[in-house]
Amino acid sequence: MGKSFGGVAVLSDVDLVVAPGEVVSLLGSNGAGKSTLVKILTGVYTRDAGTVKVDGETVVFAEPRAAVAAGVRLLPQEISVMPDMTVAENISLADLPMKPGPGFSTVDTAAMEAKARELLDQLGFTAIDPGVQVKRLSVAEQRIVEIARALAGKARILVMDEPTAALTEQEAALIFRIIRRLKEQSVSVIYISHYLKEVFEISDRIEVLRDGRAAGVFDPKTASHEAVLDAMLGGVAGDLYDMAATSEASTADILSVEGFGVRDRLGDVSFAVRRGEIFGVFGLIGSGVETLGRALYGGLGPVATGTVTLAGKAYRPRSAATGKSAGIGFVAADRKKEGIIAELTVRENMVAPFLERYTQGLFVSRARETAQARHWIDSLGIRTRGPDQKIRTLSGGNQQKVCVSRWLVDGIDLLILEEPTRGVDVGARREIYLELRALADHGLAVLVLSSDVEEVAGISDRSMVLDRGGVVGRFVRGATPEDLMSATVNDPAFNAA
């Protein structure tokens, strides 16, 4: 299987074979090619090379509906149910049973609920009421409804993308119970996860991708966690991250967090970030890594509990404006939705958070804006025709540099970055890492939150690992990606190794 974008190969010569009733886990770091392969298998992307066969017959999935018709269904990371509809309605959504009415047909509710009951019984969940609204179910039960809906559509191959990321261990056990039932019914499962303990527990075979290529096939009965991690991570980290601090970080804490929590997302998180250091937080989807930074900034509103001290003063994150006023800069993970303003220029994007600093009376000083923009274009090496180029025409790496530069003003003590190099090519990643290192060396405190284990291990002076809302590991500079990843395994014997 092969796929390229803009002449750059993101998937090259990858083979994946799944037998009826087999569970094959697909592993790889961010950018390994997992998402591209899954999108080809489910009709989101068309392949550039290779073939896809179902039951020995070559198929072409020009759109997702073609994949569904062939029995291939995707369960995405984010649960996709209609919360205000009943369990039965969600399960039969694509094929509602109808009955004749007085001049028109109506939904046959009895038949719909009977069908839902049959499918839930088939999965071994007799306690779920087909007539209850889905929003009243637990997250794990909503996952079960998704699986039942796929079976209602005659799914023969289920692609599960991080299905347990937002679940507790007890809830994850329910999903494993269903997977074993599916195996008995000859339904195949392609299971994508970073939780090695789960992968070794549920898989018949483990396939690893790295840099868009096959990196190894493992039998979970005989392979070790270390061997799988080595195949996932390879030796690329040193090439990107061979940078060291040029000065010692201060012993004074800029940010001190004690017992920080957000209901159903984070619980009892404590750590401190010093002036002049890069503090990294690694976590997988659902670990809380996607919540911690914006909760500290105030982007979630006044929802957090615990004690936070910022630059020696008590701080309560109530809103984004509160965070900005307190001296926090925040770069969101989703650059296109929350970072750039696509139709504005580089200059306008760069000064957006602090427009009041460039205002004289009733007017904005374009000259001062331009001077600020040119300064950071030169300092950060932003590749642009000039300050007035539309930001949407820049590469992802240069857009990200603009998002960082807007916070490099007097009064900012702490810079929080979510997924700082997501969607950025390798060359631009290294440039961004070097700039973050330089900013820290000049005294800025940098908090990086990322699901890229190599990134956190490579650039951090100190780091910690989140798993399902709590801190499960703390590390100093020199810790390897394997060290950080192993903290998420939740296997005492492996962690002690």
Image (cartoon, grey):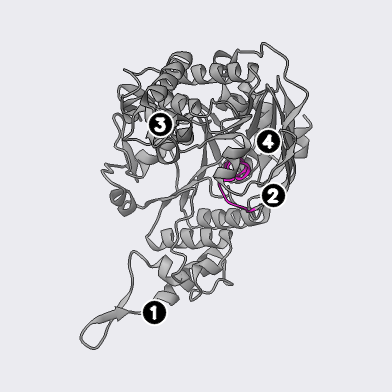
Disc 2 versus disc 3: nearer the observer: 3
State the image coordinates of residue 345 (x, y, percent, origin top left). 34, 29
Q: Is residue 124 visible?
A: yes
Which residue position is annotated with label 4?
A: 465
Could you say which disc has been placed on residue 181 in the image? none
Which residue position is annotated with label 1?
A: 109
Residue for point 48% across, 55% down:
79
Amino acid, disc 4: Val
Task: Name the quarter where the N terminus is drawn.
Answer: top left
Q: Is residue 488 visible?
A: no
State the image coordinates of residue 135 (x, y, percent, origin top left). 52, 66
Amino acid, disc 2: Gly
Which residue position is annotated with label 3?
A: 349
Residue for point 41% across, 70% down:
89
Q: Secondary structure at mark 4?
A: strand
Ranked by sequence position, the earlier of labels 1 and 4 is 1
Query: Please, is residue 208 above or below residue 120 in the view?
Result: above
In three-dimensional space, the C-alpha distance between marks 1 and 3, rounded to whole angstroms, equals 53 Å
